[in-house]
Amino acid sequence: MRGWFVVLGLATLFTHLLPLSAMSRPWATPDLMLGFAFAWSVRKPVYVPVILLGLMLLLSDLLLQRPPGLWAFLGLLCCENLQSRAKRLRASNFAAEWATVIALLVGTTILYRIILAILLVEQPNLGSQLIQTITTILYYPVIVFATHVLMGVRKGVPGDMDARGGRI
Amino acid sequence: MANNRSNNQDYTRPLRRLILVVVSLVLLATFLVWRIDSPRVERFRAQVTDRIVPNFDWAMAPVTGTVNLFRDYQSYNRIAEQNQELRRELRKMQSWKEAALQLEQENARLLDLNSVRLDPRLTFITGVVLADSGSPFRQSVLLNVGARDGLVDGWATMDGIGLVGRISGVAKNTSRVILLTDASSRIPVTIQPSGQRAIVAGDNSAAPPIDFIESPDLVRPGDRVVSSGDGAVFPAGLVIGQVAADPGGRLRVRLAADYERLKFLRVLRSHPTEPVTDTANILTANDGTPAPENGEEVPASE
């Protein structure tokens, strides 16, 4: 299943990199890589180990022309947070999970811009980045639907066994 | 046992935390190294892109083809309208052809006056656009020609009609072109016919604004914008576009290149002027031999 996560990450990057048009778009595509990482972290944290997640996020940073490492670092912290909450979120409904994700994403964006501002790095357009955060938040239910239904990555239910036969 | 697994986690949690700290430090270190020594990390980024993106090429072609097919299909529905439009445009084009011929003659006369020769050493390499920048914050494209084709940072890139951008980042098989619309792109230009120098500064919009015009009254929408070659950074005389005024009154350039359909790009080879390495030898008045360098003795003349 971890291999499938890598394939998913590469497919996400592929859609970002399609040379459909060189014109600048006023809207920003949602950050699908982070969205899928969040969805998988909440449902099956076993399938997104830290090293793999760090590598995929760093790769997406490098390929998408962001300052390498910063967004990956912040995304990694958020995913770890979600993974440690996975047990609690398992019992609650989707609204709680979405609220957590919204809070994490907004916090990450703010922290990202603050760190870039402190280190005097050129920042992407504030409007575009806000639109990207908002579209990621709005796309999150679609991402969750895709992981739940299409990929079969679901929350653990009492009675589930993990790969070695122990109970989850 | 409801909490059987948490016993296992007591053993693995410190290890997981350690791995998390190590990976976080690696990511932070990458970011700090990028902040401190950006060219090295950018070269690394170019190499990573070089390795990975061309592997997507086989899949991007059918997907892009399908998307273009959908776009074309929508236009198939309006074939009759398009026919009329095309006829009208053809008539307009013919009048433009006349205007172009006259301008060409005038241009030849003016160039003659200046005794300027356009550089015949501007050969080019043709490349194909592989991928977008992938991010809405950077306007750039990836070309499939790189260092093995002799590309060098800073060369100008055109499509068939006008200037498209600059090479910034060269790897072995691929290279990145920063487009004129990107926020960090600054091109010195000349606005014809008034001959004013200005700078076209991209700001992530489709029509980059023109800055630093000396007398804005002499510039009107419709004037041609060509590269001026100031600072020997870019070759001179490359078509960039036309001046247009946006609703706020700001002067912008409507780019001549077709940014919606960038496929084949030409990278113009422009070799920089030779650097001067010799010290200036002073010719003395005595017998024309140059003055001695440091420490050398002048041989007594016979």
Image (spheres, coloured by chain):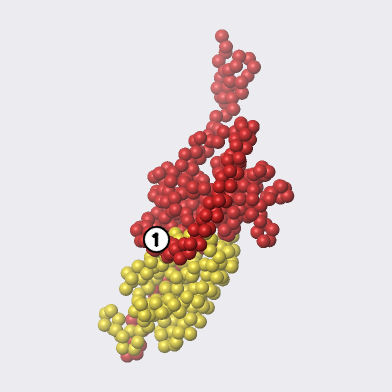
**In which quadrant of the rendered view does residue B100 lie?**
top right
Q: Label 1: chain?
A: B
Colour yellow belongs to chain: A
| Residue at x 40%, y 54% (from the top left corner) | B50
Q: Which residue is mark 1?
A: B65
**In which quadrant of the rendered view does residue B252 lie?**
bottom right
Confirm whether residue B241 shows in the render: yes
Q: Is residue A26 above or below residue A157?
A: above
Q: Amino acid at mark 1?
A: Gly
User: Farthest bottom residue?
Assistant: B1
Q: Is residue B146 above or below residue A76?
A: above
Q: Is residue B44 above or below residue B194?
A: below
Q: Nearer the viewer, residue B169 or A47?
A: B169
**In which quadrant of the rendered view does residue A92 lie?**
bottom left
- The hue of chain B in the figure is red
Compared across the picture, whether B296 is left or right of B4 comes to right
